Amino acid sequence: MKARRTIDWPGAAARVARLIPRDRLHKAALDWADARPGAEGWAVALSGGADSVGLLLLLWAHWPGRRARLRAFHFDHRLRGAESAADARFCARLCAALGVKLVSGRWKAAPKSRSEANARSARFAFIDREMARRRMRVLWLGHQQDDIAETMMMRLARGSGAAGLAAPRAIHAIAAGRAGAGLRFHVRPLLGLKKSEIARALRLAGASWREDSSNAKGAHFRNRLRLDVIPRWVRAAQRDALSGAALSRELLEEDDRALEAWVDALCLAGADGSMSVRKLAGRPRAVVRRALHRWLLSQPRAGELSRQGFDALLRAVERGAPVRHSLGTEGFAAIRGGRLRFEPARRRRTSH
């Protein structure tokens, strides 16, 4: 049996940081991180793959003052048997060598339907739970330019707009799981780098990482894009298509922020949860669409609308005329007096 190579992980981190200096990290993530309180704890999602290993090494090297409050979170999906267990052992050795506390979890009852979405949901449920327990608000993720292209193509296939196509964002503020817990931040500093650049830096630094063998199979849509579509697309483009996709993502995020600001400036929401339809009269459809999306998300009893149902309600809002539109079994979207409101469905009395 081949002996396992011992790696000087602190030395490797220093070498990776020289190969990927701070100015190669995404500027928005860099500026945001430098402005954070010094006592704040940071969590890193660590799978053992090249991206997450590179991210952990860069955080450890570029922010030495944060090392004592750095935590790595590893979740064992138990989908690849001994290979998954080896990933967990690798992450434990890496964190021990760096003096970073590792928080580990396992999928105790993996479902029979082991889809990519199920696995992702289980992983983030574990991370959310452990971050809440430790009162941590910042999660660092290793997404890079290849991930941008994959995500963009996946979302184009389902007809996403600017908000969806602007993912993954360098800084993404989301509501924490518990009510009143404030915001949590997902930070992605590697969006200006390609996966090949990260792997090359790790190799030159004498570091290693774990390869997920399931990534070489076409069982999931993302894998099929990664293995078959994107390499051909890059060759056909005869240019740096991955950087082009990353630039498009940045521009789409700017457009998305502009739409959000426009809707905010209209002050549409009422204290009773209704929305002014009159103020949307004559506005571009993109603004009306965004306002309607936001209103629907604020209605806890509204059912999920089909694309056709949403488009019908959108046209009604644009017209502004009185209407009553079904939002599932719980109630209706009703336009009355120039405002859009949720009207609960009347319960039928049962005879005894």
Image: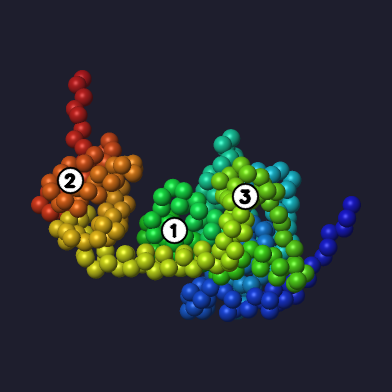
Residue 12, quarter of the rendered image = bottom right
The nearer-to-camera label among 2 and 1 is 1
Residue at (21, 37) in percent of width and height: 345
The residue that mark 1 highlights is 165
Q: Label 3: state its secondary structure.
A: helix
Give coordinates of residue 153: x percent, y percent. 50, 53
Which comes sooner in the sequence, label 2 or label 1?
1
Q: CA distance from mark 2 to mark 3?
A: 47 Å
Residue at (89, 52) in percent of width and height: 1
Q: Residue furthest top?
A: 352
Q: Label 1: state its secondary structure.
A: helix
Q: Amino acid at mark 3?
A: Asp
Residue at (25, 44) in percent of width and height: 312
Give the colour scheme shown.
rainbow
Give coordinates of residue 110: x percent, y percent. 60, 40
Q: Amino acid at mark 2?
A: Ala
Q: Is residue 212 visible?
A: yes
Check the image and report above or below for 31 versus 188. Answer: below
Q: Which mark is residue 228?
A: 3
Q: Amino acid at mark 1?
A: Leu
Which comes sooner in the sequence, label 1 or label 3?
1
Residue at (56, 42) in percent of width and height: 115
Residue 64, quarter of the rendered image = bottom right
The nearer-to-camera label among 1 and 3 is 3
Q: Which mark is residue 334?
A: 2
Q: CA distance from mark 1 to mark 3?
A: 21 Å
Give coordinates of residue 51: x percent, y percent. 63, 63
Which comes sooner in the sequence, label 2 or label 3?
3
Q: Would you call the spot at circle 1 few (<14 residues within 10 Å), some (14-19), or many (20 or more)? A: many
